[in-house]
Image (tube, rainbow, N blue to C red):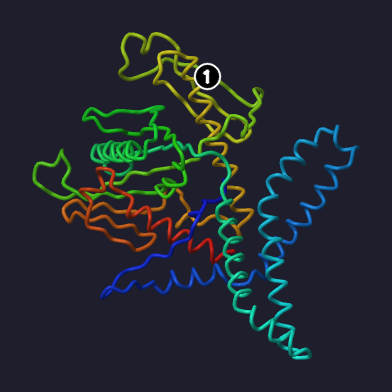
Amino acid sequence: MGFHPALVLFQPATHEIDGTLWMSASDKDTADFLDKPIEGNLLDKLSAMQDRFVELEQLISDPKNQGSGKFQDMLKEHGSLAAMVTLYRDYSRSSGSLQEAEEIIASGDDEELKELAEAELEDLQKECCEKARTVRMAILDQQVEGGDDCIFEVRAGAGGEEAALFCSDMFRLYSLYAEKRRWKIEVLSESVTDLGGFKEITFAVRGSGAFTRLCFESGGHRVQRVPATETQGRIHTSAITVAVMQEAEESEIEIEDKDLRIDTFCASGPGGQSVNKTSSAVRITHMPTGVVVSMQDEKSQHRNRDKAMRLLKTRMKELADREKREEEDALRRSLIGSGDRSDRIRTYNFPQNRISDHRINCTLYNLDRFMTGDVDDLLDQLEAHDREERVQSL
């Protein structure tokens, strides 16, 4: 993965004062930046991309390569570059025309040509700005790899039973939001407490744009409220962690059988007559990396193994993506924080009906609605902030 996509059209936030729409200074700076001439590191990267595109065209047209094992890879790479190279060439033509007009005006050798160039200058400047913006927005829009589906791992941290109950509340929040967006939820595994909370729950969210929208949920979530178990009305502070991982597509992560150790054991916990009588639970260890997953919620060993393999591939993908982000630091996505589950990203204060996101210093007083899935306001602000940071890194 490595990146988030931006919105297809960048629309800076505005607010209204006395009937007039005003744009914040930071949003205006970002909007202006999108229109600036393409130069420096970004220009070098686009030029190198075009050179590679031309090289691939030559390789693909060479009969010697058409029967090689790498031919399909060449076609795929060529196709992945085509749209961006087209936009870059379009920008380069406009930029060249603008530069030519400016040179004619500066030289002043031919008065008639100078008048024509001056008449066209404003339109050429506007056209160049629009095409520079189109290139930058296309780059942001392409900075995502993989599919839309994601897997959540929500775990209780400090706070015991109250933290487990908050895990349950957050699962309900994500389920309600998924229903609103017409996404599907599939519970992969869960560990339920006596009071109905979750020590941990793993679930998949499937639907268009699910990962892009929900990836900002990764991190530590702190809750301040009077627990259901509190008899004297004291406010307690508890914490849970959330990890959001882009689900690996079937062909995306190749895992060889020889690299796996698969153990079976009797499931524990509630589940009827099959529990503790058959070895239906599965634990899979990926030997080269040490990544371990286990699954026991299904009565069938085969289904538990299938779920465990999906989760293993997703964790392997997340591991590979993290390494890729570190290697490509200059162009990595801004997760508004590292996205690590240990980073505290948000506080939920129930007595004050307040929710605070510490990454963008945003405080809202609608926690009651937020917990019922009304989360778009905060997610919009997180997306806008993330987009601004990524634009500035181009």
Extreme residue in the left direction: 232
Amino acid at the residue labelled 1: Asp
Foreground of the two, 187 or 143: 143
Foreground of the two, 179 or 214: 179
Q: Count of labels shown?
A: 1
Label 1 crowd bin: few (<14), some (14–19), many (20+), radius 10 Å: few
State whether residue 293 is above or below residue 324.
above
* Residue 194 horizontal/vertical position (percent): 23, 27
Q: Residue at x 32, y 61 (%)?
A: 362
Q: Residue at x 47, y 17 (%)?
A: 303
Residue 153 appears in which quarter of the rendering? top left
* Residue 27 horizontal/vertical position (percent): 43, 69
* Residue 351 horizontal/vertical position (percent): 16, 53
Foreground of the two, 18 or 142: 18
Residue under pointer 1 = 263
* Quadrant placement of the C terminus: bottom right
